[in-house]
Image: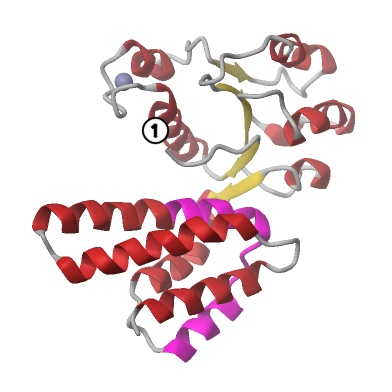
Amino acid sequence: MNKLYPAYLFIGAEKEINEYIDTFLKSILCKNNKCNTCLDCKNIEKKQHALIRFLQPEGQYTISQLDIIFKTIIFKLNIDQDFFFIINKADLLNVYCANSLLKSLEEPPQGYHFILISSTKDNILPTIASRCIIKEFRNYNSENNILLESFINLNINNNDIIKKIESTKISEHEIPLLIDQLYQYWSDILKKSETENITQKLIIANKALNILDHSKEYYPMPGSAKIFIRNLMLQFLSILN
Ligand SMILES: [Zn+2]
């Protein structure tokens, strides 16, 4: 399973995000590979899962509305348990509410995770955004797909790829999810080439997964996302040699 982070910020259309979150939660809480039929899956769909708490603001968020978070996280989870707070309309967290959450977002007790949702990035306080792994749904498709494609079609001209990387607007907060997506892609290729017995692809997929594994040890510092991507790409290109 992919590594889980303390806090995520999903930005984009509500419907698209909700579908994504459904699958995301099932991939973690269903013991049967997102089967859609077990009690965990059913409860995720009904938004009634015991390990998920959905928060919806009444107008703006109030401190007392967030109380449930602080009352919940004092309970220690089992070592293999994960608990999720889904905070809808995170742009409606005012400064006081946001401040009360900062510490929990940054270093929640073992097993607790936050998923903040907003239709726009504009009204999200920078203190909140900087503590979250950000996934932009609408922009993601145009901006980051360029990068994803580059890593997948490794036979493109070297210079073209570097130019593409220079022209994207990726930030360091978006890197972990890009890596996760790449990881997913190459894992699928690996499985496929194992079943279809394609040795050359198998070797490339193995090497790609190795590089991605190592990349998790040096996630970029603020402002160095492009350098990170560039280095990663150079490693990927070396697979072919
Ligand atoms: Zn299930």
* Residue 78 image offset from top left, x and y in percent: 56, 14
Please state the total of marks drawn on the protein image.
1
Does the residue tagged 1 have its C-beta within 8 Å of any atom of ligand 1? no
176 is higher (above) or lower (below) than 29 = below
Hey, which quadrant is residue 166 in on the image?
bottom right
Q: Is residue 141 visible in this depiction of the protein?
A: no
Secondary structure predominantly adopted by residues drawn in magenta = helix
Q: Amino acid at mark 1?
A: Thr
Hey, which quadrant is residue 215 in on the image?
bottom right
Quadrant where ligand 1 appears:
top left
Quadrant placement of the C terminus: bottom left
Q: Is residue 79 visible in this depiction of the protein?
A: yes
195 is higher (above) or lower (below) than 61 = below
Residue 120 appears left or right of 19:
right
* Residue 213 image offset from top left, x and y in percent: 48, 56
Frontmost residue, 76 versus 85: 76
Does the magenta portion include 159? yes
Does the magenta portion include 25? no
Quadrant placement of the N terminus: top left
203 is higher (above) or lower (below) than 71 = below
Find the residue positioned furthest to the left.
Answer: 196
Frontmost residue, 214 versus 5: 214
Residue 91 appears left or right of 26:
right
* Residue 145 image offset from top left, x and y in percent: 44, 64
Residue 46 appears left or right of 52:
left
Q: Residue visible at 65% across and 66% down?
A: 225
Q: Which residue, given by chain and number where applicable, does mark 1 sit on?
A: 23
Range of magenta residues = 158-181
Q: Residue visible at 49% across and 38% down?
A: 17
* Residue 5 image offset from top left, x and y in percent: 61, 38
Q: Residue visible at 47% across and 51% down?
A: 180
